[in-house]
Amino acid sequence: MAYSFPEEVLEHVFSFLKTDKDRNAVSLVCRSWYEIERWCRRRVFIGNCYSVSPEIVIRRFPEVRALEMKGKPHFADFNLVPEGWGGYVYPWIVAMSVAYPFLEEIKLKRMVVTDDTLELISKSFKNFKVLVLSSCEGFTTDGLASIAANCRNLRDLDLRESEVEDLSGHWLSHFPDNCTSLVSLNMSCLGSEVSFSALERLVARSPNLKTLRLNRAVPLEKLSNLLLRAPQLVELGTGAYSAEVRSDTFSNLTEAFSACKHLKGLSGFWDVVPAYLPAMSSVCSGLTWLNLSYATIQSSDLIKLVTQCRNLQRLWVLDYIEDSGLEAVAASCKDLQELRVFPSDPFGAEPNVSLTEQGLVSVSEGCPKLHSVLYFCRQMSNAALVTIARNRPKMIRFRLCIIEPRVPDYLTLEPLDTGFGAIVENCKELRRLSMSGLLTDRVFEYIGTHAKKLEMLSIAFAGDSDLGLHHVLSGCESLRKLEIRDCPFGDKALLANAAKLETMRSLWMSSCSVSFGACKLLGQKMPRLNVEVIDERGPPNTRPESCPVERLYVYRTVGGRRDDMPGFVWNMDQDFSTFRDSQEQENGN
Amino acid sequence: MSPPLLGIEGHNQANVSPMASSSSTDCVSQNVSCLKERNYLGLSDCSSVDSSTVMLTVPADPKSNLNLKATELRLGLPGSHSPGRESEFSPLIDEKQLFPLIPSKDGIFSSGNKRGFADTVNAFSSRPAGTHTKTEVASQECNNNKINGSNISSAPSAKAQVVGWPPIRSFRKNTLATTSKKNDDVIFVKVSMDGAPYLRKVDLRTCATYQELSSALEKMFSCFTIGQCGPEGAPSREVLSESKLRDILHGSEYVLTYEDKDGDWMLVGDVPWEMFISSCKRLKIMKGSDAIGLAPRALEKSKNRN
């Protein structure tokens, strides 16, 4: 019965499927659908670069145009992953330079990118359009110069929060005069000053420029020049927002802002001089995203600003905003969906601002659409968490960081189990949770019981025993990423739930109680997992089997052991009985 | 391929030696090789795992204390044994304190004592480079601070920093650091006073309000003022009362003015403090009579202060 559609028709139908989930489902239907789908998949997302090899990806998807990939574990952001751990993208680029000559997009997160990599990218892909390097490192401004010079159709160059060795600002001048395709430029992480005239000319000849995020070195006095040339901007990141207070600068800036009728997002704001804030009044009512998380201005100035932004959906701010400021936000910003409050003085012993749990409670009460929270504070209570949970049952991301570890409910001195329990019980759609404060195994019981949609969980200084970890691993059906530090979780729960690890992207455990012996057992029994021990004290078999490892990173993979492990990382499926001698010879570490 | 059992054996199983003690090495080698798959609870809810691979090993009632003796972990490859943990410690970590997996005398496994935060930090501080705390000194101090709420002794202002806590990205940490440095910049401006033989300099950053600036200037120029009113009022040796001094400075005698970035002489006090310090180039304590040309109300103001 020939009732199948011609391939072209199926391909056309599949082209409407955008998500990996849908495409993966389609490819399971039958062999011919698998074949058709794999030839027309254009976007590939690889959440862990070591879960698969470039060869496997290329073999299955020969016509990829866009690659998005992540490298190091999330805790690398907080210096928990030593230098040299891995996450090198170069081998991928080498393989793709041959296999995907029409590659257009590369988006990387927490990967090591070198200047050679950037040069290879710029020369291998004739139609290269989008480069996003999020929290990456390993390259210099010379690499950026290659990209600028050679990518004729470059649309996006976004270096968000990457660590770039800043040799000079000269790279920007490498954009050729006939490059007019820029849509998005984010250089906010760079330190050096770029040639302002080169920047100005680049902006002037980029009529499609929608996002421009400058670095701190671009002076405020010159910002109006840029804005006047790019009134179509949708997202702007200022440079340093400070200058001598002069009325002409002020009026130029005001005029420039008022010409930007499409501005939806503002960021930057380093070194703010409050006197200049009113210059942006005209754009406030149109803003949906405001990032003031580097703006060291006081609550009163912050309040004046945010109360004008009635359509705000995302607000990132320092804790200078204080509870009073958050009350004002709750009253004015009824569309608020995401709130992030960062600490201004995270390492100080005493609170320097009047920001408590009350601020978050106010926002949870006043903002009906709030679903994503990142909040740093110094005190919390179960009552507040219960209130927040009841106010916002549609919460999706809830990340609370109480600055001092193991701090109990400040009112009752009890653990915060009940509070976080209320969060997971009421917020049935919760996908991401980070916890802090004093927490016992109880909270993990709640999580295992209720957090059925939870995909990512971050735990620190919490729990009493393996039971805690067991609750999580056995109860959280949707769990993909679990990261744990400084918790008394050991071998039992881990080994008992070994099979669960194959259903997750990765597990990170540092400063816990997992023994070398358990890691070996896990590694040897679970061939589809890479069980990597990171230990800077030397080979784990030079210590007793029962000795806990410093750090453990377990992830599922079809790519086998990785071949770029540094001297302080061991894969547990190797044979340790003969290991010691050969390792010492190899590494000489 | 049937999935391996990596679980804890229940009550009914043959005893395998606990990894902590070495008394039954034979058992270890024997039992590791005969680990069998069991589905103790008949559950298929091992998260998203197939029911066929279930190996739940926790007793049915998770609320009860784990019957720890029965669920002791059996580990170790055939032929290996872990001699008493007490004897073979890594010299770098006080393992016993940190990871109390040693069964106590009655065989009950206990991992219940929460590690004191201080212990953790102490352990970190003895590690080689890469994971050490930011300040080794501070971590030693932390030994005296149990940060569990109850007995926080007087903590130094830069308290012991655990690696990666609080969880803030380096970019943000570095930016905050440089921002606060900028805020600490000093702003020294020259201060002249009519009739005084030499000028002074004052750091505007040390003051937060006009009042503070005024007090600072009073202190600086009091000697001149005393000399000034010597022939008229009390003899110069006499200590002037605070109020008299203030009167002299705030009275019709003197007015505080400043030169701004454009070179104009302005009366101090009109604009917000922050704006003032960013535009002030120098200060001048003018005689009230000279200030008449400055602004008519300057005199009024100074009269009102009496």
Image (cartoon, rainbow, N blue to C red):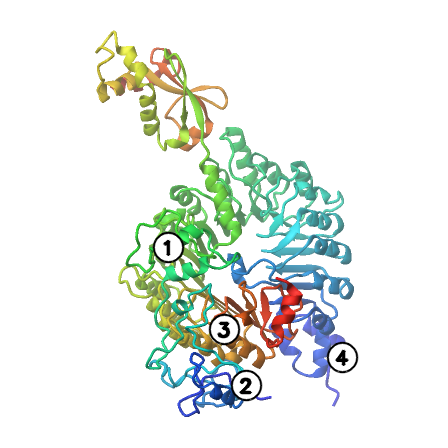
Question: Residue A273, can we see it?
Answer: no
- Disc 1 marks which residue? B142
- Give the crowd class for mark 2: few <14, some 14-19, many >=20 residues within 10 Å: some
CA gap between label 2 and label 3 equals 24 Å
**Compared with residue A374, is residue B81 higher up or lower down, i.e. above or below?**
below
- Choose between A220 and B23: the one closer to the eye: B23
- Disc 4 marks which residue? A6
- Give the crowd class for mark 1: few <14, some 14-19, many >=20 residues within 10 Å: many
User: At 28% across and 62% down in the image, what residue appears?
Assistant: A413
Residues at marks 3 and 4 touching, judged by CB atoms closer than 8 Å: no
The mark found on residue B4 in the picture is 2
Q: Chain of mark 1?
A: B
Q: Chain of mark 4?
A: A
**Compared with residue B19, is residue A215 higher up or lower down, i.e. above or below?**
above
CA gap between label 3 and label 4 equals 63 Å
Q: Residue furthest top?
A: B231
Q: Secondary structure at mark 4?
A: loop
CA gap between label 2 and label 4 equals 45 Å
- Disc 3 marks which residue? A544
- How far across and how far down the image is residue A106, in percent? 67, 60
Residue type beneath disc 3: Pro
Residues at marks 2 and 4 touching, judged by CB atoms closer than 8 Å: no
Residues at marks 1 and 4 touching, judged by CB atoms closer than 8 Å: no
Q: Chain of mark 2?
A: B
In this picture, residue A98 sits left or right of residue B261: right
